[in-house]
Image: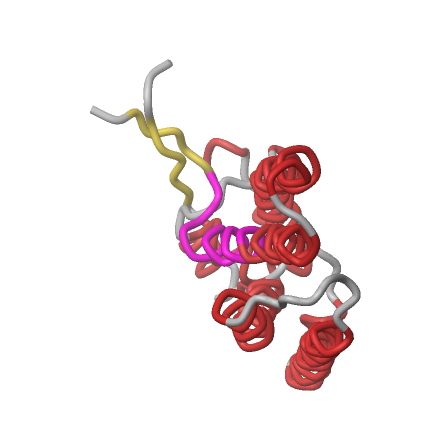
Amino acid sequence: MPYREKLAWLSLVAMAVTYGPYFTLAALAPPTTALPDLSRLGVFAATSLSHMVIIMVGRLYFMARSPEDARAPADERDLAIERRSKTTAYYLLMAGMILVGVVMPFTAGGWIIVNAALATIVGVEILRDGLIVLGYRRGVA
Amino acid sequence: MSPGTITNQIRTLRFLHGEMSQAELGQRIGLTRQTVAAIEAGKYSPSLEAAFRIAEVFGKPLDQVFQWVKSA
């Protein structure tokens, strides 16, 4: 498996095990207090920190397992896959930001907007990583 | 625009060059082993520059390494 595909899988798994529970909690037990809700901010901080730790540990593991692949610069196929993934993910980012920044201030407030913005960013990352995996699996013409 | 696919003879040419590995070919043209494997399998069409570099490694003209096959 290409090194950069492994990193994309790592990012997907990290998102699933950290932001998955966070957004499940946000959906099942939405914060009721106004911003700032320190306990909910604490949950978010723990989520972000654990995401960061998983990514760092995973990258160190992959670097130790295949140091040559880790050192190798991205070649033209890596860059083509990255470029296509980013281009597609950009449209989701734009749509999400318009929804969160232009529409939602008139219909919602506080934590709903905050979590919608976070969900957009996480969704964009998941889409980008998913497209990278697909690019390596199915090929780029 | 007529549809078609790009085929290649890289696997054969590697064999004819002392069973050159994908990693060695990749190293000589600045691509990863996985990208060489993807090119061989037809899952990635290389840039014109990479195609010329591959042909240069085998000492063949480009059209003896890559072919355009029109779909029926």
- Residue A123 or residue A54, whichever sits in front: A123
Colouring style: secondary structure
Most frequent secondary structure within the magenta stretch:
helix
Return the residue found at the far top. Answer: B1
Residue at position x 69%, y 55% in the image: A114
**Could you say where residue A89 lies in the image, as x and y percent from the top left?**
59, 43
Work out whether residue A31 can be spotted: yes
Residue at position x 55%, y 55% in the image: B35
- Residue A132 or residue B2, whichever sits in front: A132
Verify whether residue A137 appears in magenta. yes
Answer above or below: position of A63 versus A141. Answer: below
**Could you say where residue A25 lies in the image, as x and y percent from the top left?**
54, 73
Count numbered badges in the picture: 0
Instruction: Say left or right for A65 vs A139.
Output: right
Stretch in magenta? A127-141
Return the residue found at the far front. Answer: A33
* Quadrant, the C terminus of chain B: top left
Work out whether residue B51 can be spotted: no
Verify whether residue A111 appears in magenta. no
**Could you say where residue A19 lies in the image, as x and y percent from the top left?**
59, 70
